[in-house]
Image (spheres, coloured by chain):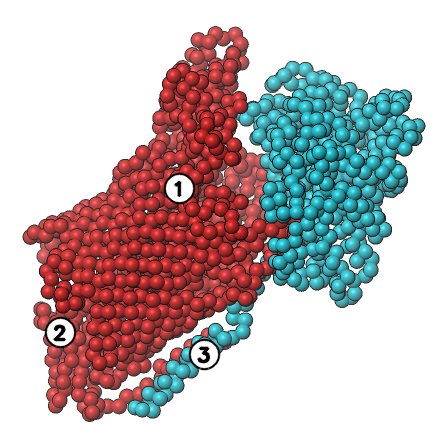
Amino acid sequence: MRKFLLIKSILVLIYSAAFGQDRIVSGTVISAEDGFAMPGVTVMVKGTMIGTATDLDGKYSLSVPENNNVLVFRLIGSVLHEALVENRSNINISMKPDTKSLEEFVVTGYSVQPKREVTGAVSSVKGELIENLPMQSFDRALQGRAAGVHVSSANGLPGGAVNIRIRGTGSIKAGNEPLYVVDGVQINSRDDATFTQSNPLAFLNTNDIESIEILKDAASAAIYGSLAANGVVIITTKKGKPGKAQIRFNAFMGSSQPLKFLEVYNSQEWYQLRKDAWTNTGSPIAAPNTLNNMGILPTNWQSLSPEQLDAVAAGLSTYDWQKQMIGSGSLKNYELSISGGDERTLFRISGSYNFQESTFKPVDFERGTLSISLSHQVNPRLRVENNLNISTFGQNIPFATSGSFLGNPAFSSSLILPHNAIYNEDGSFNTNIGGVFNQNIAMVNAYNSGSQRTNTMVGNLAANYQILENMTFRSMVGLDYRLVQGDQFRDPRTPDGSGVRGRASTQSNWNVNFITTQTLNWFKTFAIDHTLSVLGGVEYRSETNEGLSGSAIGFPSFEFRTIQSGATPESISGFWSGYRRIGSFASVNYDFRKKYMLTLTGRYDGSSRFGMDTQYGFFPSVRVGWYVKEEPFLRNSDVVSDLKIRASYGRTGNDQIGNFSARGLYGAAGNYAGAGGIRPVGLENRNLSWEINQSANFGMDFGLLSNKLIGSLDLFHRKSQDLLLDLPVIATNGFTSVTTNVGELVNKGIEFELTTINLERGSFKWSTSFNYTYIENEITKLYGGNMFLPSDPSIAVGHSLGTHYTQQYAGVNPATGRPMWYDANGNITYQPVAADRKYLGNSLPSHYGGFQNAFYFKGFEAIVFFNYEYGRVIADGQYNSLRENGTRLTTNALREVADRRWTTPGQITDIPRPYAGGPEVRSVNMNTGSAVLLKADYIRLKQLTLAYNFKPELIRGLGLSNVRVFAQGINLWTYTDYPGYDPEFLGAATGIIPQTKNFTLGIQAGF
Amino acid sequence: MKINTYDMLRSIGLAFLMAISLISCDGILKVDPRQSIDGFDALNTPENMEAALNSPYARLRAVSAYGRNLTAFGDALADNGLATNNSGRLFNETRNQAYSHYTHWTNFYFGINELNLFLEAIPGIQGTPEVPTATKNRWEGEAKFLRALFYFDLIKAYAYMPGVTVPELDKGGIPLVLEGVKTTDIEKALNRQPARSSVDQVYAQIYSDLVDAIRLLNDSRGIQFASQTAAKALFSRVALYNRDWGKAAELSNEALASTRGKLLEGEDYIAGWRLSVHPESIFDLRFENVSESNGANESIQATYTTIRNLENTNQIGGWGDFIPNPVFVNLIGISVTGAGPSLTISDRGGDVRAFQYEVGPGRVANGSGRRMECIKFASKNGFAFGDNIPLIRKSEMLLNRMEAYFHLGQEDLALIDLNFLKNARGLEEVTLEGETLLAEILLERRKELAFEGHRFFDLKRYGRDIIKQQGNVPFSDFRILANIPQAEVDGNKNLDQNAGY
């Protein structure tokens, strides 16, 4: 009902305008540059709302009231032109290009600003920079493109999760994800898939993106209030442009290749390693024990000599399970778009198909998208717009996306003992697998199956109404709708399905996210020098998320793979959750002669997630800028072609907590004897509120030597306070903890961006872009005077988030080959205890960025792009499993590590002697403490593109306006000491499907 | 034109008014969860009361409770078994490593809070038609039985038994809280810091709850719920631990007289352990379906045996982490031949209890091959890893009574009970007196209740040392008591940690 009233009031607005008329004036508008007609130029009678736009031939005609005498001609990219009517009935105009307004425009939250007037810290990534990359979601493509924006791939699943941190990690327990806004619609970026990772941002074809703006400082983001603490990423999709319809066809195809294989031991090397391990335990029968571990001990072993036993091992073949499980995949992408428009209507329609296989079968990604953008000038005052992005993507799922599951190929293929054959001689799978991996992972992955499908619709409908010449009202409704479905089948021929004769699971998850925004814009220039513009608005957002899931067991045979064929329902479950948010906001911009700029913003926000007494909050910000270049002393400088100094301060909130975290609830839990149970599940905190970010930014934008060298430098200090932490409650009082706003941490750093044109001679051009970020994170306060969190001592005051709190490794005792650690007093110990832990290294990178060189010569292009990270220290679960040298479990070992193992007294090394069955007597696991910490610094050749643009005169005869062919490589080369699959990994990194190298060939054609 | 402008401004005003009405409208930010309800008035209907009473029962299924620890640790911490290190679980408990001990503190205090809230809600409960007094009595009786069970299981693990202590290590009983903390009462949750009550105070409270439970309950509900007989049976155990021999004899006598639970003999006894509900059960913990199972790693079946299915003892199921040691195998009268892959049982002797042990396939890749395993819980419910667990069996009543008779000086009655049990289990009658009679009674108790969580407490209440191959643990050692969770001690300045931790 409320929505209806709202729409009605908009309609009232639309129909309440009327016009007087007097005399007809007509004419033609041409370009002063080339003399061609200019369509789409707005022609207004000054001081009124009367106006029109020029047609395709540049012609216009409108009636001008008697007492009005000035026409205003306006087109973005041209100098505004005013013409006196007097007694003329025909006025022809030639418009000059506006070099100033040709400069970039930046979307800054509910408005668009010329870049020169931006006083916050905003990074802008243009669509063409990330065009045609074989990446399913734009977040992945942002890696290394903007200072202060750290992007890492959690894994290499096509369409998988990507981790973005804008200006560091600001929260300990709440979310750290930025807010994503697509064409004004705030979208939900939560991964709702159960069976694989489905990045919701993969719904959008990256080639439909016009630009991505990243609001980094709190002052720029504060207009988004309680959603903005982690920064805001604003995506604007491509729109039609006036003129002849343009048809573009775009295709590329290629392959995915493994980044690397881990070099593991062959059968004989492993036999020797394990035999050493048994010998070191003092076992008199090391060789038989080893053969027994491998599952190939001859029954008559007691009658065999040591040489004969060794001969058994010497005769073994080695099978490369990694080569079996990891191979090349194909990828392809096709797109067709048509865009154009006239003075009243602009349109763009595009469709795309994208397919990419991972290097692990059957993991893939297949997507179709349809994007429609329409806008229509109903009358000179009213413009309606519609943007619609519809997409569906499907993913064949891996056995597991991560973890030490025996069936997970990314985990097992390097660890399975190499003497195990993959196939029997008759071509069937070998099921007699020796070692802890008692299953044939090739078979497991061939027989199990499943898929995940994501259907998304993100769209909006907006009306812009020009109430007065300097006042516009905009009303927008938007929807972000997503349905995620998945199913998985554990085949009864494989270990996970055999005990239950097959298990099918299924999932459906709906996300409905509605938003409406009403804004009013007003501007006025006073006494020529003072310009004031004001934006005010209200916004309402509601989100519901619900799901259904179930599983069944007992299938007639492996040929029946869907849930209804199961004899026994195993589980059935569902959930519902939702929240609502409402806010009103205002922004006031003032500038004096475009030299001194001041912006004040404020947002009053309410969210249903927070406590009864703290549902509403206020988020203000202030930004100031000084455009120094306009000062007399710089105006004529040849060296300094551009200079702006800016400072900002703002407050934003982080509302990424559970929808009902503030409530004291009884939940359905504790079923007994077939009847449902309920129990208290949380304490009510009426004061639970958002986390607050207060951030200060000081920066400058500069251009030197006619802007051959442009760049910006930013210093920031981001203080996150009122951080949500769980205050422990003692069990005798019946609860575990209650979430309260108590903690504090600080992120501070430097960001630097530089773009240079190094050489421009004739048709040769060489340009370079470079960005660098330094960031420091420090926890400054926890609750109750605690110096560390009792539940997680690695979170400690004075240290960064992500710090490793563990025992320090002291290497191997050269005399005995046993691993040693330092105790709390700095002495050597074989059995470190909890009290010996120290703060050692940190898993957040402190330096990162990107570096691009582009070369152009007569239609040829070469783009070389690197990204880099420095200062990260992590443990890699996959490497750790291999690092144990097969001592604890019968698994394979990494050659590089196992060759380093201690073998002779006096040997200095970091890898202890192998000891069968695990740690030596009175010792701890060799992977304890910092022994496994690795430096994850790297420089990666992320992108290499070679392209050729055909000369227009060559292809004109074919009806083509432009043709570009290109060859591209992604992740071609990495400089790193990291011994695991990929230094970019996040988290435990055990059994994660790595990223891939991609090679593509493509063509772009315009008609 | 002026009129038009006026109209326009009016329209803008209207539009904004509508928009503002969105904000000012009361309840726009009110979103209620659909899978939970507000805590302050959750216990407001008879249906919700029934549901709230299910939750504490379900807590008994947890791994920290009878789902594993309270069933297995009583033997692992004592002298009946050894750990295979197949999965590594129970390895440290079997070696009596400090901090590897009972962990049900949090779970059971949560349960106690639920029961306190439940008991406080009974008088105010409204219903149409009105809730009958009989129902309210049953609620109160079951809640008090469960509260008594929770307190008893806590104090037996975290404090010394009444009168049998090591004074220099004795920190008293456990906190006694009888008032609930509501979901709205954040102040009480953060600030109430109860100290340890004395052992006697806690036992007095358990007595009082059980007296009420016996008065309020009858035996009409299923065996998986509290009943009058279950309350009497629990009372008999509590009294035995409290060395209140008269009470123990009286209540075990009454429990034995009840028709709830049937004392089994001979073949019936062997078959009883294969039934989903043990016929001897006086109170039987129910695992209703697969989703309630503790799974392939931590369920009691997975803990005790690698056998998945008794029809095919070579099919590998669980981990078989904790198995009987040779001393115990010998006590129960089983003889074996061979070792490793050729291990077989050559003779089970006359004791029918020997049929609760079987050679399992083991976990060759992880450590042990074929080993002797306890199969009291071996998938008897019809789905794997979800065995119902008898919390109180009829045989225990007989054992409680004979022990109480002995201490009451009625050795003749004790001997009659002892020989009755020996007969039922296929053993020769004996004629004993004095300490040798008590030793025999305790030996039968050890054999009968093995792998059901009793042995550690039976040693503890006599102040006896634990003699085991993994290293003896004298009664004077601090490891006899469990460590209280550190967070609990950190958060409650009035709570003393047990000595040595």
Kind of residue sitting beneath label 2? Met
Q: Amino acid at mark 3?
A: Met
Q: Residues within 10 Å of mark 1 (few under 14, many from 20)?
A: many
Please indicate whether residue B210 sits to the left or right of residue A651 in the image.
right
Query: Would you name the residue on which mark 1 appears?
Result: A842
Q: Would you say the residues marked 3 and 1 are in contact, meaning their CB atoms lie under 8 Å apart? A: no
Badge 3 element: helix
Q: Are marks 2 and 1 on the same chain?
A: yes
Which kind of residue does numbered mark 1 sit on?
Answer: Asn
Q: Residue at x 32, y 39 (%)?
A: A937
Front one among A96 and A258: A96
User: What colour has chain A?
Assistant: red
Q: Residues within 10 Å of mark 3 (few under 14, many from 20)?
A: some
Q: Secondary structure at mark 2?
A: strand
Residue A59, located in which quarter of the rendered image? bottom left
Front residue of B408/B220: it is B408
Q: Position of residue A467 (x, y in %)?
A: 32, 81
Supply the letter of whichever chain is cyan.
Answer: B
Name the residue carrying label 3. B18
